[in-house]
Image (cartoon, helix red, strand yellow):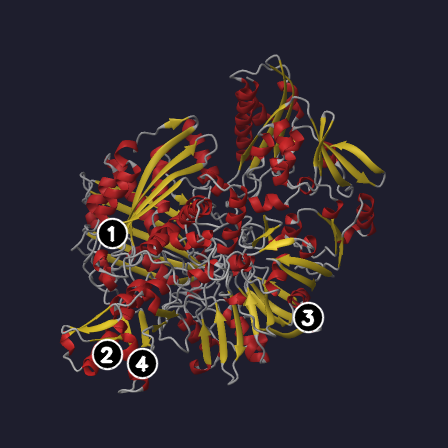
Amino acid sequence: MLSNVKEYFRPKTVEEAFEMMEADREHSIFLSGGTIVALMGSSRIERIIDLKSLRLDSVSIKEDEIVVGATTTVEAFRKDPLMRKEFGDFFYDSFSLVGSWQIRNMATIGGSIAPKLGWSDVSACLLATGAGLMVYGPDGYRRIMLSDYFALPAGEKPLITHIIIKKDGWVSAFEKFSKTTFDIATVNVAISVRPERGRIKAARVVCGSRPQYPMRFETIENALEELEINDVMPSIVRSLVFDNFTGGSNMLASFEYRKHLASVMAQKAAEKIKEMVR
Amino acid sequence: MKITLNVNGNLHEINIDPGDYLLEILRDLGYKSVRRSCHSASCGTCTVLVNGKPILSCSTFAASVDGQTIETVEGLSQGEKLHPIQEAILEEGAAQCGYCIPGIVLTGEALLRENPEPSDDDIKLALNGNVCRCTGYESQNRAIKKAAEAMRGDDYE
Amino acid sequence: MSEAFETVGKPKKKLDGRALVRGKPVYTPDYDVPGALTVKLLRSPHAHAIIKTIDTDQARAVEGVVAILTHEDLERIPYSRAGQGYPEPSPYDAYLLDRKVRYVGDAVAIVAATSEKAALKALKLIEVEYELLDPVLNMEDSMKEGSPVIHDEEDCSGLFDKSRNIAAHFEMEIGDVEGTLNGCDYVITRTYHLDTQLHAALEPHNAVTYLDPAGRLIVVTSTQVPFHCRRILSRILNKPISEIRVIKPRIGGGFGGKQSIIAEPYAAIVTLKTGRPARIIYTREEVSMASNIRHEMKYDITVGADGNGRIKAISMHGLSNTGAYGEHCLTTFMVSGSKTLPLYNKVDAVRFGGDVVYTNLPPAGAYRGYGAPQGLFALDCAIDELAHELKIDPLKVKEMNSIREGETSPIFKIMGEGREGVPQIMKSCKLQECIDLGKKAIGWDEKRGRRTRRGSRVRGLGCALAMQGSGIPRVDMGAATLKMNEDGSFNLLVGATDIGTGSDTILAQIAAEVLSVPLEKIIVYSSDTDVTPFDVGAYASSTTYVSGNAVRLAAEKVKKQILELAANFLEREEKNLKLSAGIVTCDDGSSVSLEELCTRHMYTFNQQQIAATASYVGEESPPPFLATFAEVEIDTETGKVYLINLVSYADCGLALNPIQAMGQLEGASMQGIGWALYEDIIYSTGGRMLTNDFFTYKVPSRMDYGKLTCGLVESYEPTGPFGAKSIGEIGIDSPIPAIGNAIFDATGIRLRHAPFRSEKIFFEILNLEV
């Protein structure tokens, strides 16, 4: 058991959930999938606010946007017919080795983003797709970019209610390097490009598990603009990532090794994109 | 706090601590097939089905599944008749120490409900989170495949 | 051969299988003991320190706390945690609690409370003042002059040289190694280093203890060695053996990790001090950091050969890391020589020796293979290197220098476990058949040395040969009792300890075969020190051979009784009687069923219990043999090794139960694959194990290998029960050298330090290319 927990809340509304958190931020935690809360095993937690009762677990389409409820599980998300129709195998394949089947049935999309975990494959892929978030904070609802969420100061933790992904014709690919198939990424790379007449019109390049949280590399993205999508493109992506990668060392890999891996993963992702565009 | 659990068709109204994990509650209720091994959501030993889906009871708060339908391996075999996966596991020698087996039987069952004709790769992916330290996996993968065949056949009701 | 038998040699389902697959409450944590206190241990955050003061006042005040014990409350009794034969060839260097802590995780205090919550709260409130000592965190530093002394206490015993942190030392030489090497055409000297490994059994170490109505201590525990557990508890608790009963239910995996007495004493001491039942269950982190791990070993090896690849001399000098305590220190070290070097028995001279040293790291202990994998990594890979220098197929070199049927090695006599060994001649050795089948299955001749490329990936093949033993000769004893019931069934009581290996099933098969009854007629019970006869337990690949022979002898005694009584009952000559399919028949057609015979003898006629007990001690230890082949693909851009196929063919004599025997081989192979590629143990600079959970310590999953192809060759060991030898350990010996050799074949990179981490391989490849 998580021994210091004294209260368990099932808020009915987003507003209520946020107020419960505000009442005692230090000792409270939002519970979505539960895997991270259990992993932390923190004695700080005295109040659990279960977000499942908000029923934010559907995937819907609104004009040119897909709106994903934050408590949609990773497995439901990757297998959702709408997601597969709009994004093909991108999410389906990319999330197939997030934890295990059990974990994917528990972990939620919102819960994968919120703790700002470095290794999250979910965060890396969503960043690359330019996802936005609907969040609820002290000033009510607002829509922010996922990248802005990661940049929020540590104390500021609005409640994520929806993830919004644009249906904008970008092409995405993801690659992960991990020691075993049931393991967090040593490094992961997600790339999205907007192709136009055989060239990259715009790109998003994300590296995660650096080991810090996933980050877009704008220098690389800028350098890729107007690049022709041909056989040498993937190796150009590789060297750009190699030259611009920032990150550090931890138990899984040294910085030097990570940099190499990131560049190789980026090349592989770019190969996939090349194939898809052709 | 008070919650209700439907475990293998039995309704339990119970008082729990808000920090209790499902694993501990199920064991206290007598479902001893649900066992702890790693306590870091990394081995699959404690797998149970919630609303038909395999999840890890070591990392699921009991309060979060209030009112939901839970299946453990105790509910799978009727009387002396084993579930086809259980039977296949014995035939293939796929249980050694047996500690991982309830989780494997349940994950396998959930897979076969969703996909009655799984490929070798489907089986490996579905059960990749069920760690076994004894067998080397080959016999277990074979057993799931064999059970799938048996369940598709006429002799399974 | 197996066609001649009714029950042995058949792929019988495990007798305990139905209970296991249905999730029945069969493991120690499933045994409800009302009112059992929760026992938790306060553990040291420091690798090396003296406890100056412990303040337990606040902790004692926590509601629900029943007892807190520190070293001040316990009698100081040095002991060895090693569950080995007595007297143990391991030093007495451990204390239940001590005023000195010797690794991060060492026990400092015992807390017993009515709930887990209270126990955990109390743990946090115990205040300990430590005087920090310099730690020894590297085995290379341990013997150096000026290194801190880890066991400086006066009352420890059996250590080789405590002032230099040497727990054990061994050396032997046969022939003139230096002289022979001087005469060799080719000599190579290399250093091989193999890191430690976690057992990672899924059931954590745990025990529950209580006093029976007569005041005897009952210990239900997840152990491989119930009788050693009872003896060691008797010493630590200062309580006669007659007042202790150890019960082993089903065990959720052991692999050697439960061959030491780890958690039991802490629950037992609480029960004795409070009179109340007590339960201890280690957390995963405790199992990893504070039970046992494998001995890290490093070998300097020299191999000399003539120009044709005939190996003339081998010298191995090793260093082994026993961690903070010395259980199994000498014996694992000796086994790394004694269960590897006899494989290459055609040498003129051989030398083996070295030191086992203490460090301030988690204590090492028994682990499947028991030193043999560490020795074999050096031995096999060095021979592989030599073959490449000679430009001869390494398999050919291993093949022509290895042992065959009818041969021997002088090492068998010189090196036992902790003492002299026993000479023996190989009565069964189908190593050539293993090689031939494995070679074909992997496609050795077609694929080796080709370095086939597929994109950034390059393929290679490697091989390794291995041997093990079957019990410790003239040391390991197993006994069995067989008693007959009036329905013609038999209770088979064995001290042999089924830890998931299926030994209950194969022992029942042996009894059923001798008595010519269906397997269902044998009801096995293992193991309970009050009920079953003595057996050393599940280790040293002993159960099939040693305990199996005991069962065979007991069944033969019972069979003799049955025939004698039947002769008397039928008024016929015993020599004319035959026992078959549960009926004793005379050649004149008269007969009596076992059911009727036993019922008569129980209730009405010449009343007596038909029963017998038999013991067995091996006079030798026939080795199983193994040929392993690995095919790997290395991604030269990431350094990642993909295991395409691992082929292992074994000679384990007659496989009493082929599916269970295959299960041992496959499981051990996978454990070896995990060790080779994934199972890194990483420590902080202060000596804390960072990879102490399954989130960070990666045991292989289903998708982490390509194919695993195992097979058993036909063989018959005349001294084994129905021709059987052991199979429990050998599979783990060979994957590391086979994979290491395959990586070399693919890349030209010789990795002499395992596990083979992708980062290391990547930078080696980079160096090659530059």
Residue under the point 52% across and 17% down:
A232
Cα distance in 3D space between marks 3 and 4: 62 Å
Q: Is residue C144 above or below residue C208?
A: above
Secondary element at image label 4: helix
Q: Which mark is residue C599?
A: 4
Hey, what amino acid is under mark 3?
Answer: Ala
Residue under the point 59% across and 57% down:
B8
Q: Nearer the viewer, residue C291 or C363?
A: C291
Cα distance in 3D space between marks 1 and 4: 53 Å
Q: Earlier in the sequence, mark 1 or mark 3?
A: 3
Hey, what amino acid is under mark 1?
Answer: Leu
Residue C726 at what x, y percent from top left?
30, 59
Residue C275 is drawn in which quadrant?
bottom right
Residue that carries the numbered disc 1 in the rendered image: C343
In this picture, residue A93 sits left or right of residue C461: right
Q: Nearer the viewer, residue A172 or C325?
A: A172
The mark closer to the camera, 3 or 4, is: 4
In this picture, residue A64 sits left or right of residue B132: right
Number of dots carrying numbers: 4
Secondary element at image label 3: helix
Hey, what amino acid is under mark 2?
Answer: Gln
